[in-house]
Amino acid sequence: MICYHRTMIIREVLPEEKDQFNTVVNHPLQTWEWGEFRKKTGLEVIRLGLFDEKKIKAGYQVTVHPIPKLPYSIIYFPKGPMPDKRLIDALIKLGQKEKAILVKLEPNILTDEKNSKPEVWQNFKLKPGDPYFTKHTFYLDLTKSDEELMTAMKPKTRYNLRLSQKHVIEVAEDNSPKAFEVYLKLMAETTKRQGFYAHTPEYHQKMWETLQPTGLAHLLTADYQGKILVTWVLFKFKDVLYYPYGWSTREHQNVMASYAMMWAAIQFGKKQGCKLFDLWGTPGPDPSPQDPWFGFHRFKLGFGAKVVEFVGTYDLVIDHRFYPVFNLANALRWKLLRLRTKLPF
């Protein structure tokens, strides 16, 4: 697929252009390596690039999700750049080729007065869509000194962190198969306890096997008296550290191992040269205490992290006939998924 705009063209990126592609994308979900992982889960991955002759100026990675028992698909474009007419034209052509009902865009762009105006999105004929990724996340500034970071914490968080230090929680990077087995075990325990939906162990296994050897993914473990209590997978891309996955056990809750883990992750990011720590999502600036993610929100907020807001989720509708039907079916699907997490098995 090739789209021409003046001297620039948008075309598919070739395998030998992998390194160029990674230099122009700005989120782990847009990296070449993430695309390779998603291929292993059975999805079609398409990488487009904006080229000025042979030099790539921007990269766009999408996944194609077939709709079961129907000859249609959904295209997902997470954490890309701000769309422009050139990109929208290319996505429309791609959507038509893939028989997509819609292309779902969730740009990695923070809200401001300019890009949050409704007319900006209406000009591209984009509709507000149901989110796959949270609209809000926490940012923690890793350029601050340890003293500044400690001062910015909530008093209770600072107290719990010092309590964890008294109990001598040992946090280390451990990328071994044995440590990852514990990660999967704690994932099952955490999701059952908290009652929320998570990807399958097979999904996480493929993710780890693909990303860890490239240096993108790192596994941290928090150990107390010879037992791992907390496991986190962190992504490091360019100068940003990300916290996408974290699991824990109820055992020895009094030693506050998660607080030791967060502080160790901060130190890990600093040593890696990261300037920012993206804590990968929150329900919003003021979630209800009944929200299943409220505890995670409160935990992250305690470390002095700042809530930031992205522009949100938008649908580029390709097939207007089936778009309303898809939205109804997708809403029902998510209700069933949430129900399954609360069943006693």
Image (cartoon, rainbow, N blue to C red):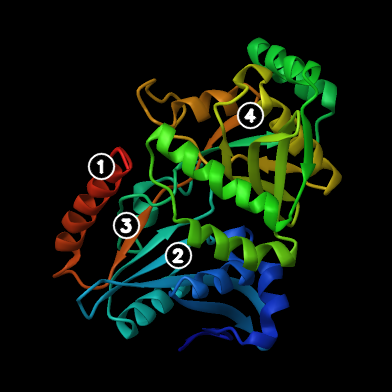
As drawn, 81 above or below 260:
below
Tell me, for residue 62, which label it has, or none.
Answer: none
User: How far apart are the alpha carbons under marks 3 and 4?
Assistant: 33 Å
| Residue type indicated by callout 4 | Ala
Measured as percent of width and height from the top left, residue 115 is found at 47, 49
| Residue type indicated by callout 3 | Gln
| Residue type indicated by callout 2 | Phe
**Residue under the point 35% across and 23% down:** 290
Tell me if label 1 and label 3 are in contact, CB under 8 Å: no
User: How far apart are the alpha carbons under marks 2 and 1?
Assistant: 27 Å
Q: Residues within 10 Å of mark 1 (few under 14, many from 20)?
A: few
Q: Return the residue at label 1.
A: 339
Between 317 and 332, which is closer to the camera in this rendering? Answer: 332
Tell me if label 2 and label 1 are in contact, CB under 8 Å: no
Tell me, for residue 305, which label it has, or none.
Answer: 4
The quadrant the C terminus occupies is top left
| Dot placed on the residue nearer the N-terminal end, 3 or 2 | 2
> In this image, 171 relative to 96: left or right?
right
Between 73 and 217, which is closer to the camera in this rendering? Answer: 217
Q: Residues within 10 Å of mark 2 (few under 14, many from 20)?
A: many
Measured as percent of width and height from the top left, residue 84 is found at 47, 66
Q: Return the residue at label 3.
A: 122
The quadrant the N terminus occupies is bottom left
As drawn, 66 above or below 252:
below
**Residue under the point 70% across and 62% down:** 212
Tell me if label 4 and label 1 are in contact, CB under 8 Å: no
Secondary element under disc 2, as helix, strand or loop, is strand
Q: Return the residue at label 2.
A: 77
